[in-house]
Amino acid sequence: MTATQAPQEAPPTAMTNRQILQAMSGLMAGMFVAILAGTVVANALPTIIADLGASQSSYTWVVTAELLAMTATVPLWGKLSDLFNKKLLLQLSLGMFVVGSLLAGFSHGVELLIFSRVVQGIGAGGLTALAQVVMAAIIPPRRLGKYAGIFGAVFAIGTVAGPLVGGVLVDTSWLGWRWCFFIGVPFALLAIALLQRTLRLPAVVRREVKIDFLGAFLIVAGVCALLIWVTLAGNEFDWASWQTAALTGAGVLLLVAAVFVEARTAEPVIPLGIFRNRTVTLTTVASLLVGVAMFGGTVFLSQYFQVSLGKSPTVAGLMSLPMILGLLVSSTVAGQLISKSGVWKRYLVAGAVIMTVGLGLLSTIDADTSFTLLSVYMAVLGIGVGMLMQNLVLAAQNDVPASELGAATSVLSFFRSMGGTIGTSVLGAILANRVASEMTKGLDAAGIPSGGDGGGESSVPDMSTLPEPVRQIVEHAYGVATADLFLIATPCALLALLTVVFIKEKPLKTTSGMERLAEEAGAATATDKTAVGS
């Protein structure tokens, strides 16, 4: 399929700080919406599922539907940003998010809710990929650090504050769980208006556009098959089962076919050539490992606060503030220092070291850990992630041609999201088995019939209904199991550190993606004229 685009009319000029901040207002609102969509339901889901009369499997799908759709579509959005108007694509993704949010908020059945989460996920995938692509297009890498720090802070606030907002909405009788979905709509509409008013991007310098629909389908289908497997294995079916064989076999075959197609098409969704770039390859691997370590470990903190420490959903959200503040401060300060000095690798290495230490410290927690000590551990983890996560994107964007900014950025976002999905699913299965084992051991030691075999999935108990001896056993079980998750996540962070060490530091470019794209187009035109003249 081909489409015609208007050529660029005039060479782009560098934007002033004021123009950049104005344009970023819409981008930040959009990014906040994307992150909020995936996290705001964390503390509200038990209430939502009970109100809709749905099953435990529906509980899983409400969570994973949005994450699957977002992760699988990020590369496609990234590639489209290299071919079409980025501003219109951003507004389209925000519009899809609004539609999905309204459908979710008005849902009276779990089927419509799951479908609406898919629509939300597709929109969130566009926002996740395009916000960073547009940043790289309008801001030179040399100045990107300080602005990337602001985006890292927005990412942190959306990730960790989402469960707090959801808990408050559910606990507020005159609002309720439906506002977990409605709350993102005004932010999305505001982002659309701000982008229309403040974002000025030149037309894409291409006359013919070929969209690789076959490659896009194979990538999405293959990734979805593997993500469905890691999401449901250990819960809906055993890890060693025919379902595992079918899903992994289908996923691998589809992705092999995708590689075959991508290597031979003129406009691949994921240009395989970008992996010849050492920086892109290493930052991609590091992003995957950060996703496993960060999301896989911290997603269960809210459950630990509520079950093991006996806190309410609202208080559990507030207890995450030390991590937010650590990430906020470190991402902002590191970004400012990088923009000032032009040196960035030391912050990647330091961030990976601190993240590893933070996860190691959190592996020592239990049901009796004081909140003061827990706050220090979470702050250390937040500081490490803030220095590392956003600057991995900066390193990759600085080292690719402007024409591949979208693809490179979306690849990093895709692998980070996939790492988070894999980490959440695998560590969730480990948590369920360890909790069941510890509860059986504790109940047997107390002379209370456990009725279990020490393994498998166990439902989350209502702590308010348990007698004191059983409640203490459950609190201990969740404390020990949560600590084990951080212990398992720590080697992933250590591997991320080893990966980051091998990234070669290169000077940050002083021209924006728009300016570099114009330079590349001019160089290509000059080369063509020289070839014709000779």
Image (spheres, rainbow, N blue to C red):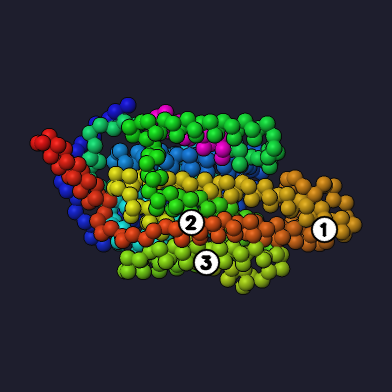
Name the residue located 47 percent from the left edge and 67 percent from the top edge.
350
Q: How many marks?
A: 3
* 48 left or right, relative to 443: left
What kind of residue is marked 2? Answer: Thr
Residue 308: percent from the left, percent from the top? Answer: 70, 61
Front: mark 1 or 3: 3
Tag 1 secondary structure: helix
Q: Please state which amino acid type lies under the numbered disc 1.
A: Gly
Q: Please identify the quadrant where the N terminus is shown.
A: top left
The residue sitting at 78% across, 52% down in the picture is 437
Q: Residue at x 82, y 53 (%)?
A: 440
Q: Label 1 crowding class (10 Å Cα cut-off): few <14, some 14-19, many 20+?
A: many
**Residue 214, horizontal then vertical, whole percent:** 42, 28
Q: Residue 203's x, y, as percent? A: 23, 42
Residue 213 in percent (x, y) is at 40, 29
Would you say residue 217 sits in the magenta stretch? yes
Magenta-colored span = 212-227
Mark pair 1, 2: CA separation? 41 Å
Q: Amino acid at mark 3?
A: Ile
Q: Residue at x 59, y 58 (%)?
A: 491
In this orientation, which residue lies closer to the viewer: 318 or 50? 318
Residue holding disc 3: 354
Q: Please name the residue that numbered disc 1 is placed on.
A: 442
Q: Report the magenta stretch's main SS.
A: helix
In the image, residue 119 sits, relative to residue 299, either above or below, namely: above
Which sits earlier in the primary sequence, circle 3 or circle 2? 3
What is the CA distance from the residue labelled 3 to the residue labelled 2? 15 Å
